[in-house]
Amino acid sequence: MSDHGLDDEEIERRTAAAEQAAQEGRSREAASLYNQLGADIQAQCGPFDTRALDAFEAMARVISGG
C-alpha cells in the first residue's frame, strides 16, 4: 500500500497499472497487481468493499485468459 493511503486516485492508478500489464500480455504481473490491490482495499476498507471484489474479479479474468 502507498504511504499516503489508499484513496480513489490511488486505486485508479493501481487498477490502470494492472490493466496495462494485462494488455501487454504480462498475465502473472497483472494478476499479482490485482490481487495485492484487492488485499490492500480489504485491509483498509473492509472485506466486502466492492472495489476489492472488482479487483479480485479482474484477477480471475486475467488468470482464466478472458
Image (cartoon, grey):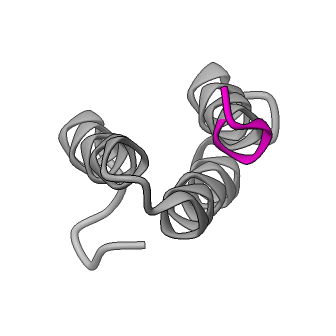
Percent from the top left, x then y, of residue 34? 56, 52
Res. 9 image quadrant: top left
Percent from the top left, x then y, of residue 36? 59, 65
The answer to whether 36 appears left or right of 21 in the picture is right
Q: Is residue 2 above or below residue 58?
A: below
Residue 63 inside the magenta-drawn segment? yes
Res. 12 image quadrant: top left
Q: Which residues are magenta?
A: 62-66
Quarter in which the N terminus is drawn: bottom left
Percent from the top left, x then y, of residue 61? 69, 31
Percent from the top left, x then y, of residue 18? 39, 51
Q: Is residue 58 above or below residue 33?
A: above
The answer to whether 9 appears left or right of 56 in the picture is left
Task: Label the magenta part by its dominant secondary structure.
Answer: helix
The answer to whether 17 appears left or right of 58 in the picture is left
Q: Front-most of 65 and 20?
A: 65
